[in-house]
């Protein structure tokens, strides 16, 4: 027998995405690139753990909105918003299993840019072109709008402003860029969110799958 991908090397690992055995080299090379790995694949989990332990900080060129300062105490003060953003993204992923880090980053960055322009007095909205990222953009924007409406008058907390939401999106985008591994089908950042903001079991198991045309 030979690897189901290269058809040269002996197969050593069972690939749940392909339903066949593949070699370790093809597993490492094609993982989250040509292979759409399920999140519970033990080889993927081990790879993500290794990447997290050896990941280097973002370079200056990779750091989103380098000119923007986001204070740590501000993020903690607005942690309910961060948790809500994470929940909105993860709930969306439950309905759209093919969501990946790239689409999440595109949605967050596009919405951050929309809010940034609002701060200059100009409304300029440009959602992502890709249907899935565009749909997530709308979901996150909807959450922020609902939060701002429900946040009005809450004791001890100033109402959430567009500038506040912009800074929280910048923070989340920086975390996303740090946690993803850059592969085209990576879900490492989504796994990072799920580990820290777990959804209720009934949401994970019962949510219907919605297809974006």
Image (cartoon, grey):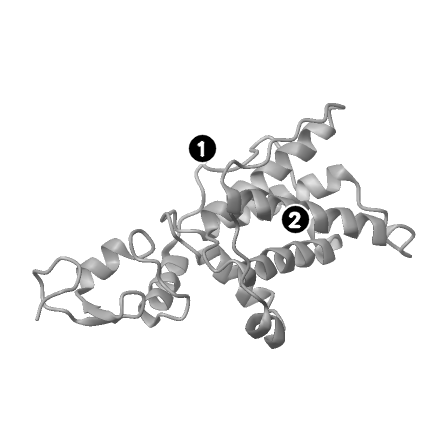
Q: Residue furthest front?
A: 213
Q: Taking the image as drawn, is residue 74 in sight?
A: no
Q: Nearer the viewer, residue 64 or 124?
A: 124
Q: Taking the image as drawn, is residue 63 in sight?
A: yes
Q: Earlier in the sequence, mark 1 or mark 2?
A: 1
Question: Taking 104 as reference, is 85 left or right?
Answer: right
Residue at 47 percent of width and 50 percent of height: 101
Q: Count the numbered circles shown.
A: 2
Measured from the top left, where is residue 16 in percent x and y?
Answer: 31, 70
Q: Nearer the viewer, residue 5 or 105?
A: 5
| Marks 1 and 2 close (CB-CB < 8 Å) | no
Q: Residues within 10 Å of mark 1 (few under 14, many from 20)?
A: few
Helix, strand or loop under label 2: helix
Residue at 38 percent of width and 61 percent of height: 48
Q: Residues within 10 Å of mark 2 (few under 14, many from 20)?
A: many
Q: Residue 159 got which mark?
A: none
Measured from the top left, where is residue 196 in percent x and y?
Answer: 57, 65
Residue at 64 percent of width and 60 percent of height: 87
Spatial CA distance of label 1 from label 2 is 26 Å
The residue wearing badge 1 is 61
The residue wearing badge 2 is 140
Question: Taking 179 as reference, is 201 left or right?
Answer: right
In front: label 1 or label 2: 2
């Amino acid at each position: 027998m030979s690897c189901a991908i290269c058809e040269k090397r002996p197969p050593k690992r069972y690939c749940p995405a392909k339903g066949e055995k593949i070699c370790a080299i093809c597993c490492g090379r094609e993982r989250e690139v040509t292979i759409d790995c399920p999140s519970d694949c033990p080889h993927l989990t081990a790879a993500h753990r290794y990447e997290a332990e050896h990941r280097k900080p973002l370079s200056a060129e990779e750091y989103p909105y380098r000119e923007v300062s986001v204070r740590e105490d501000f993020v903690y003060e607005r942690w309910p918003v961060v948790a809500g953003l994470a929940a909105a993204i993860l709930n969306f992923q439950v309905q759209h299993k093919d969501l990946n880090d790239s689409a999440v980053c595109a949605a967050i960055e596009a919405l951050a840019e929309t809010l940034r322009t609002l701060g200059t007095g100009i409304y300029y909205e440009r959602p992502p072109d890709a249907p899935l990222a565009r749909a997530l953009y709308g979901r996150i924007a909807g959450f922020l709008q609902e939060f701002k409406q429900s946040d009005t008058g809450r004791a001890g907390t100033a109402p959430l402003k567009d500038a506040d939401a912009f800074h929280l999106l910048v923070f989340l985008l920086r975390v996303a860029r740090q946690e993803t591994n850059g592969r085209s089908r990576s879900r490492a950042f989504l796994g990072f969110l799920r580990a820290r903001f777990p959804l209720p079991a009934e949401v994970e198991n019962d949510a219907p799958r919605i297809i974006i045309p």
